[in-house]
Image: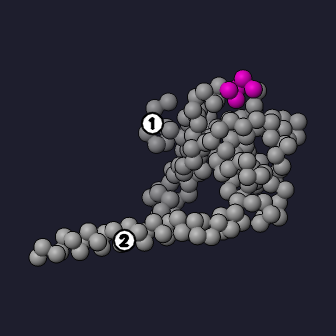
């Protein structure tokens, strides 16, 4: 009877060790796996270098307008916008623009830090993303970053998608 707590503790330690190895093992034991995922040579794109990481916010001058973009996992960029009836510090993928634009580091005008990635469920009759419902990619930023973007004259389009997509649809007050 007295050995049971000891065996249980050993078992928990073993499970923790296995989880640790599984979570960090791929990149820790074989760094080339992480490198091939991150480097643009793997994708064959004229993409950003390792200086920029996933969820970094950058301004880029494309087609004579300075816009805000987010860096994607494949080192390409995607344009961002805001929604009219939503939190002004939440940035969404602009559905009107091309996704996955490949540029090099020389095209980046300014780096604004990291956006905090999440997903926002699109209001529907079903459950959340785990139940087959659609979800929008969202990057939340601090108000000071939005002020800096405004001062730098970076264009962030605002889309009016109606009441079904914003805080009002989720019961929040704006």
Q: Quadrant of the N terminus?
A: bottom left
Residue at the image point whose x is 78% and y is 60% from the top: 40
Q: Eyeballing the image, is 36 above or below 81? A: below
Residue at the image point whose x is 49% and y is 37% from the top: 168
Q: 164 or 173, which lies in front? A: 173
Residue at the spot of label 1: 172
Question: Dot 2 lies on which element?
Answer: helix
> Where does residue 89 sit, x and y in percent of width and height?
58, 34
Q: 9 or 140, which lies in front? A: 9
Q: Residue reaching furthest left?
A: 1
Residue 15 lies within the magenta run: no
> Where does residue 166 sit, x and y in percent of width and height?
54, 40
> Where does residue 148 sit, x and y in percent of width and height?
68, 26
Which of the two marks, 1 or 2, is nearer to us in this view? 2
Which span is picked out in magenta? 148-152
**In which quarter of the view is residue 153 placed?**
top right
Distance from label 1 to label 2 (Cα)? 42 Å
Residue at the spot of label 2: 15
Q: Is residue 109 visible?
A: yes
Q: Eyeballing the image, is 36 above or below 119? A: below
> Where does residue 102 sit, x and y in percent of width and height?
81, 53
């Amino acid at each position: 009877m007295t050995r049971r707590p000891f065996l249980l503790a050993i078992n928990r330690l073993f499970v923790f060790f296995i989880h640790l190895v599984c979570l960090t093992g791929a990149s820790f034991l074989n760094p080339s796996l992480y490198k091939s995922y991150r480097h643009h040579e793997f994708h064959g794109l004229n993409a950003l270098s390792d200086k920029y990481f996933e969820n970094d916010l950058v301004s880029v001058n494309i087609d004579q307008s300075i816009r805000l973009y987010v860096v994607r996992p494949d080192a390409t960029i995607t344009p961002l916008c805001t929604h009219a009836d939503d939190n002004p510090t939440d940035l969404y993928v602009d559905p009107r623009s091309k996704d996955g634009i490949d540029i090099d580091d020389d095209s980046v005008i300014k780096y604004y830090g990291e956006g905090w990635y999440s997903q926002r469920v699109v209001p529907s009759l079903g459950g959340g993303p785990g139940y087959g419902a659609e979800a929008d990619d969202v990057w939340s930023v601090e108000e000071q970053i939005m002020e800096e973007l405004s001062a730098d004259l970076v264009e962030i389009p605002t889309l009016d998608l109606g009441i079904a997509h914003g805080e009002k649809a989720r019961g929040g007050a704006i």
